[in-house]
DNA sequence: GTGTATATCTCGGGG
DNA sequence: CCCCGAGGTATACAC
């Protein structure tokens, strides 16, 4: 990884065009050839960037980075204040815990936490517009489609509505009702869901994990 | 901006928990107090980060960053290979051209490019669930709501549908029909839109810019 | 502050 | 390759 601190101006042309007026910034060139330009604020987003693979041509006072797709990043250097190269090696990568996939696993094993009598038919039940997170049957044997989100926003209601519309075309499943499950459901999403007869279930991730640990204790 | 290259392992606890095994990485501490950890690949996204504001406590061989919301990032340092501090100053910021806002400006000035006889009533027409990009009247004087996207995907159709549903409650506007405008409209979005009687218009951004330059040439 | 929409989204998975 | 969905999304803007 090469780190350069320089006074520079930058022009990007690709999906859009953009310009950065002259200022001192960090230029980061990584081992895979990608380039990022950072200001001294905002942890996440670079001001400009070019994803690998691309070609960096270093001229006198000017770097030109071009990608396969015809994007161009032009960095005009006025003053280089620091320039260092560092060997980092491969990164073992990030281990995550607590995302939607895990929530789905937990609910697949404990559908009764969503509603009494609910039992799983299958996870990732396919429809022609994508898979439904859980397909279940309720105590009366009727089909229930479950959409699971970490945060219940309006998009998830739309998604579940589209699935329900498709599933209800299937005479073997019909009638299918919906359950929207999330750790937190936003008020507007709840209103829209209930307008459409979709039941909203807020689930407690830690409590579900508790059920798992209790189950493990039995062995 | 402080740049540290170090062999380290990292633990994050907050919205989720994550762990990074020991490796050499870049630690970036910016002027606003935010922290980002980068591997030697991938221009855009840090492996871990903490947005400002937060508190960085530097102990022997360990950094602990805590945020107001109870998030914690713990960096265990095994070996520091580089440590430098740089004065960057304020950044003038990025000027963009060619995003949705600009497309909306151009279409607001040339609604007839969407459909003959269309004229603008107002941009960002407010509804109780958010603003419609353009509200127009057609050649027959009937109301038309226009949703503009750079890329026409299914979300935009849902968004326009929600607006139309609200607008059609207003006796002064009713009946209101919809136009979905984008540089490219994905097949699935087109199918859904047309199912709902929404007209799809693919617009040529460069041609619209051409109209602008032509207009300028008259002066 | 919350809520909503955008993003050069990025990133990963499946066909 | 494209399509789709998730993200500790981040970021900007309106109310």
Image (spheres, coloured by chain):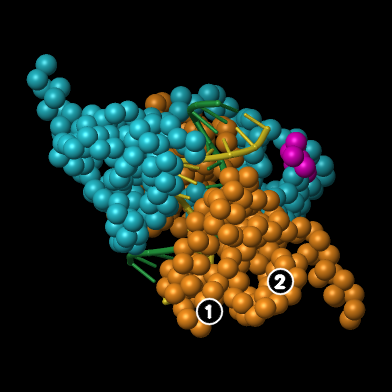
Chain colours: A cyan, B orange, C green, D yellow
Query: Which residue is found at the position 50% from the left and 61% from the top?
Result: B161
Query: Which residue is found at the position 60% from the left and 72% from the top?
Result: B144
Where is residue B86? Give x, y as percent. 56, 51
**Span colored in magenta:** A64-70
Chain designation of label 1: B
Position above or below: A95 against A45: above
- Verify whether residue B86 appears in magenta: no
Quadrant housing the C terminus of chain A: top left
Query: Which residue is found at the position 22% from the left and 32% from the top?
Result: A119
Position above or below: A114 against B103: above
The residue labelled by disc 1 is B173
Query: Which residue is found at the position 75% from the left and 70% from the top?
Result: B116
The residue labelled by disc 2 is B111
For residue A216, say whether it is visible.
yes
Where is residue B129? Give x, y as percent. 43, 68
Chain designation of label 2: B
């Amino acid at each position: 990884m090469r780190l350069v601190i320089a006074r520079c101006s930058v022009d990007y042309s690709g999906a859009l065009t953009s310009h950065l007026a002259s200022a001192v910034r960090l230029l980061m060139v990584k081992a895979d050839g990608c380039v990022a330009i950072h200001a001294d604020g905002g942890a996440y987003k670079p001001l400009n960037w070019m994803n690998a693979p691309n070609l960096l041509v270093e001229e006198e006072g000017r770097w030109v980075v071009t990608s396969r797709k015809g994007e161009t990043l032009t960095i005009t250097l006025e003053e280089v204040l620091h320039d260092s190269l560092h060997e980092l090696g491969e990164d073992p990568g990030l281990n995550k815990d607590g995302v939607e996939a895990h929530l789905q696993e937990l609910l697949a094993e404990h559908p009764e936490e969503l509603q009494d009598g609910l039992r799983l038919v299958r996870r990732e039940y396919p429809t022609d517009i994508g898979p439904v997170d859980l397909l279940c049957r309720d105590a009366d044997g009727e089909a229930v489609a479950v959409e699971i989100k970490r945060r219940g926003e309006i998009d998830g209601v739309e998604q579940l509505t589209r699935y329900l519309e498709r599933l209800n075309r299937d005479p073997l499943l019909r009638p299918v009702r919906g359950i929207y499950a999330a750790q937190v459901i936003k008020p507007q999403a709840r209103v829209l869901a209930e307008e459409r007869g979709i039941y909203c279930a807020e689930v407690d991730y830690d409590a579900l994990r508790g059920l798992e640990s209790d189950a493990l204790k039995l062995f």
